[in-house]
């Protein structure tokens, strides 16, 4: 299948391009600059430079494509997430760029359009499992823009294709800056666990997210949760990181202090989200290599140690 990946050099894009090529697909992806273009070539893909907000240019680029994957994001670093202004470009990508890409995919007669989404849009579920039909809690522009992006997949389906929204849980990987920042904080015992840490946090190793993206190429239209098999309580998630690196357990901080430090995004961490991947697994046959963050964090620790020896 001829596949176009927007955001091909991002945290999710890179392993997805690799997985697509390994699966035998013909892949083109967006890349800015010589270094990122060389990266895509090394993965076996063709790099293209394109303004994702320019409809005519995107149409020309996507022409002849059978599948379009929109993984274009601009997530701010951990220390800047609390500032609303840091999310502006990401919100624009999720709204305007998604609309342009769907228009281009429809014009190209593509069979499938896949949109990156997130599980943070679910309402606090306590200890209950959250499915794709669970209530949402849309608070703030960052989450509303994601809903707008999902709406574009519905529009693509209405146009005759298969529109798919993949709601990914929290990413972690040895090449994800957010993970590296978390490990750095954990080494200094500055990775906080809010309150008693009893709330659930769902996560997914990015390598598993990439194989899920490939599996989604053959799935029916709809919304699917992509998460690991065993969401951990926040206290256990923190311990998964520190145990993997042989560090002291993370310190707990009062919830009010965590809200003060984290700003708006803190509410996503304080929410309890025990997200189920059952629908996606049953539909596609996909399963994660790392069933929980315990196994995933051990892999990250081993890889980071290997690259520093």
Image (cartoon, rainbow, N blue to C red):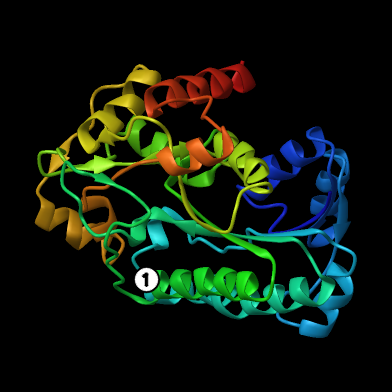
Q: Residue at position x 27%, y 26% from top? A: 239
Q: Position of residue 278 (x, y in %)?
A: 41, 38
x and y, in percent, of residue 248 in the image: 25, 22
Whether residue 86 can be seen here: no
The quarter of the picture where residue 112 lies is: bottom right
User: Count the marks: how many?
Assistant: 1
Instruction: Give neighbour class at mark 1: few <14, some 14-19, many 20+ (Cα, 10 Å).
Output: some
Query: With respect to residue 211, does 221 lie above or below?
Result: below
Examine the image and state in which quarter residue 234 appears. top left
Q: Residue at position x 51%, y 26% from top?
A: 300
The residue identified by callout 1 is: 83
Residue 175: x percent and y percent? Answer: 59, 38
Q: As displayed, is residue 242 above or below residue 35?
A: above
Residue displayed at 82% across by 60% down? 33
Query: Which of the pair 27/215 is nearer the observer?
Result: 215
**Callout 1 secondary element:** loop
Kindly identify the residue that appears in the image at 39 percent across and 57 percent down. Answer: 79
Would residue 83 be visible to someone looking at this image?
Answer: yes
Q: Quadrant of the C terminus?
A: top right
Q: Where is residue 257 drawn, in percent x and y?
A: 13, 55
């Amino acid at each position: 299948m001829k596949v176009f990946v927007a955001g091909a050099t991002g945290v999710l894009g890179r392993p997805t391009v690799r997985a697509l090529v390994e699966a035998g697909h013909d892949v083109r992806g967006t890349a800015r600059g010589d270094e990122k273009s060389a990266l895509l070539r090394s993965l076996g893909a063709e790099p293209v430079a394109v303004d994702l907000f320019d409809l005519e240019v995107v149409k020309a680029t996507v022409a002849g494509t059978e599948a379009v994957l929109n993984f274009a994001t601009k997530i701010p670093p951990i220390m800047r997430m609390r500032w609303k202004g840091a999310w502006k470009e990401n919100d624009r990508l999720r709204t305007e760029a998604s609309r342009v890409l769907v228009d281009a995919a429809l014009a190209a007669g593509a069979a499938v359009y896949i949109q990156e989404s997130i599980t943070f849009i679910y309402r606090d579920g306590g200890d209950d499992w959250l499915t794709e039909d669970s209530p949402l809690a849309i608070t703030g522009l960052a989450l509303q823009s994601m809903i707008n992006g999902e709406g574009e997949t519905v529009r693509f389906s209405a146009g005759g294709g298969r529109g798919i929204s993949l709601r990914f849980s929290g990413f972690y990987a040895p090449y994800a800056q957010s993970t590296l920042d978390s490990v750095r904080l954990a080494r200094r015992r500055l990775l906080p666990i809010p309150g008693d840490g009893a709330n659930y946090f769902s996560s997914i190793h990015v390598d598993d997210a990439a194989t899920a993206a490939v599996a989604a190429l053959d799935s029916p239209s709809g919304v699917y949760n992509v998460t690991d098999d065993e969401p951990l309580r926040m206290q256990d998630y923190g311990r998964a990181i520190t145990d993997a690196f042989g560090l002291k357990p993370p310190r707990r901080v009062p919830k009010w202090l965590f809200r003060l430090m984290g700003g708006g995004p803190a509410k996503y961490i304080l929410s309890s989200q025990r997200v189920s991947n059952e629908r996606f697994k049953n539909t596609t046959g996909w399963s994660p290599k790392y069933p929980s963050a315990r196994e995933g964090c051990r892999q990250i620790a081993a890889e980071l140690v290997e690259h520093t020896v």
